[in-house]
Amino acid sequence: MSTPNSPTLDKHSSALDAAEASASHLITVTLRIRRFNPEVSDHAEWVDYQLPIDPKERVLDALHKIKWEIDGTLTFRRSCAHGVCGSDAVRINGRNRLACKTLIKDINPEKPITVEPIKGLTVLKDLVVDMDPFFQAYRDVMPFLITKGNEPTRERLQSAEDRERFDDTTKCILCAACTSSCPVFWNDGQYFGPAAIVNAHRFIFDSRDEGGEQRLEILNDKDGVWRCRTTFNCTDACPRGIEVTKAIQEVKRALITRRF
Ligand code: SF4
Ligand code: FES
């Protein structure tokens, strides 16, 4: 049996202290979420949720808390929860971000935090948009290695400098934060959009690839790179820090010079 000073009791009281200390860090935040359920109404509305949360937690944690403890009908996408899969891009306080990479403390929790779906794609329910047009544009630029001739008997070699040429655009996680922050895309969903161009860039500038001319012709289309108005929204929105506008400019230059 434990005595008042036994190690077992000490362990329990330190666990209680830790729980109390962590509870004392909680603040109350209001998440103002744009909700839409086509089975109930034909228009969206803002709904406020108040919840206690550690400011060091992320907006995704707050969405989970709401879904699991307050309103199970809230619908959103997420998978990895660590900035890798690209499935939880949403507009937070009017700016495209990944919910899993946005800390509550970094977005002024003293005011209601607005969370709404990314723009320019049809909203299916709450924060979930139809990504089909986005992925169709991605498929249209043929995001895979194209080569001619016979299969080599060993791997295709590339110098470190040649690999560096397209390193930035390999980082894309297809979250659509760039494309859905682009005013040209908002006005005309036919535009390929920054993400498709970034992924075309990744192969056009790969020294092992032989499909560059084909991809450039695809992007020379009226809905291709020339629609870009260089607003830099895409670069600002990219959670991977990719220089999206620069990549688009490089593709434009390659179209003019045919050197890549
Ligand atoms: S370029 Fe950046 S913002 Fe655009 S889809 Fe890729 S990771 Fe997302
Ligand atoms: S959940 Fe995968 S990137 Fe945020």
Image (cartoon, rainbow, N blue to C red):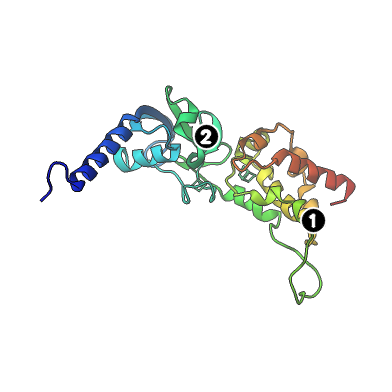
Q: Is residue 141 left or right of residue 91?
A: right
Q: Amino acid at mark 1?
A: Asp
**Label number found at residue 162:** 1
The image position of residue 224, as x and y in percent, is 75, 44
Q: Amino acid at mark 2?
A: Arg
Q: Is residue 59 left or right of residue 253?
A: left
Quarter holding residue 253? top right
What residue is rendered at 72% in x and 62% in y? 145
Q: Is residue 34 left or right of residue 3?
A: right
What residue is rendered at 24% in x and 38% in y? 16
Q: Which residue is mark 2?
A: 91
182 above or below 79? above
Upstream in sequence: badge 1 or badge 2: 2
The image position of residue 208, as x and y in percent, is 78, 62
Query: For numbered disc 1, what is the local secondary structure?
Result: helix
Query: For numbered disc 2, what is the local secondary structure?
Result: strand
Most foreground residue, 19 or 76? 19
Spatial separation of the CA atoms under disc 1 and disc 2: 36 Å
